[in-house]
Amino acid sequence: MSTEDEDRALRAGEYVLGVLDAAERARLEEAARRDPELARAIHAWEERLTPLTRLVPPSPPPAAVWARIEARLFSAAPASHETAIPLPLWRRLRRWQAATAAGFAIAAALLAWTVISPLERQAHPPAPIALGTLAPSQGQGPLLAAVLERNGTLLVASPAPMPPPAGRSYELWILPQGARTPRSLGVMPESGRRVAEVGTGVREAQVMISLEPRGGSPSGLPTGPVVYAGQISALE
Amino acid sequence: MSQAMPLAILWRPISPLYGEVKEKEEEAIKTGMLTEQQSTAEEEELPDLLGRIALGDRDAFRLLYERQSARLYGIALRLTRDAGLAADALQEAFFQVWQHAGAFDAARGRAETWLISLLRYRALDLLRRQRREDPVAEPQSPDLRDESPDAIETLSRQHEADALRRCLETLPADRRALLTAAFLDGFSHQELAQRLKTPLGTIKSWIRRSLAALKECLEP
């Protein structure tokens, strides 16, 4: 392991351990937004250290907490910009962007789990390096666009929402050229749009969407039929 | 770095709230409650619940709260040592769960890790913000302590925790205490340095070495 990798791993460890002060935490979160390796290192430490929380006994929270959550998320007449009705994830992310501006930081926990925030997309305009479309395997249907950016994020977008059949989920997969097994890029939101982090090494790849049990394939590999498939190719 | 950490002198009276938490913890360990609560069924249910929540299923959201809130609140309470802050952290974590459940990816790791990390970061943010606004107060602050050997031992009953326990046990007791004090009690570098009356640079170096040793042990 290079010194740079080692240093990155230790900085991630300090962050997850919780020893950084507020300014250092913010700086590292900012760095993790730009550095997928750092986000991965953070995630690795989360997996390593989380079992320690088993040492802490559960303690029932005050009843008022659930009441506040429910009122804020589901109240019939929302007091502010908060939405009352469940929205597709993509739209909820937009709402979340507003909430973020109001003072919530996007949890770094989420960064390490492949989804890139809309905020980041604003801060770092897209620089596509590979493009492609996904076509339905059977019958008619719109094409989906797939755009790979220089920073290793892949956007897959349907022109229309794509709610899965009841009890099922659409899961996105990538098979980079030369790879043997597809890698999950997570469940497609109902909005039909997903931004996933695939790493900066990928240029040519097959991209697929399969129909899986709700929440995604339990095995980590596609188990259901491939409903959309296509190829992304480098622009240069 | 031969200076030993003077653990013994760190045991000072702790806050009533914290004392109560600590008592519960010891009881939990004695009765084996810690392990029984984490039934496999509930863990297996988590990814499915998150998948349903991503689709806007309120029943799944409510169920997740029922199943996980006590565990998450316990962790937040220990980190913040403040019932109000802990409740805020729990609430904000559940806002984020509702809004970002679609970001959870079972292929990338355990749902438990995702959920607890989210909660811990909210709690740490609130804790650090409070300290910054009122650095002098630091009201009910416990002292550094080593988890009892019994407590560490309980980790081994869960398969994924077994490796962590083994590796923690390879560290000297004072370094292990440093890691658990940071991870569970939320002490920053600065706070650890003050508490241990040890230069900040030394603390940072101890933490880095302990992390490096832990990482190497967990990934042979």
Image (cartoon, rainbow, N blue to C red):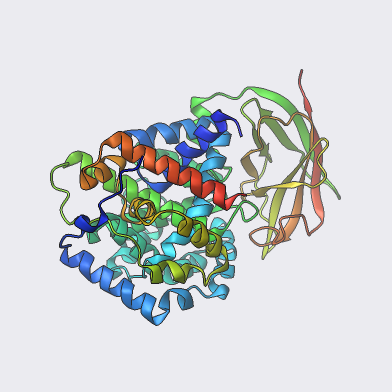
Camera sees residue B116: yes
Q: Residue at x 75, y 55 (%)?
A: A221
**Quarter of image, res A202:** top right
Closer-to-camera residue (B112/A188): B112
Compared to A124, does B198 lie above or below? below
Q: Residue at x 23, y 47 (%)?
A: B196
Q: Position of residue B66 (x, y in %)?
A: 42, 71
Closer-to-camera residue (B84/B139): B139
**Looking at the image, which residue sits at the far front?**
B2
Camera sees residue B142: no
**Quarter of image, res B151:** bottom left
Q: Residue at x 81, y 40 (%)?
A: A179
**Looking at the image, which residue sits at the far top?**
A236
Q: Position of residue A10 (x, y in %)?
A: 47, 38
**Looking at the image, which residue sits at the far bottom?**
B31
Q: Position of residue A52 (x, y in %)?
A: 44, 60
**Quarter of image, res A114:** top right
Q: Residue at x 20, y 66 (%)?
A: B17
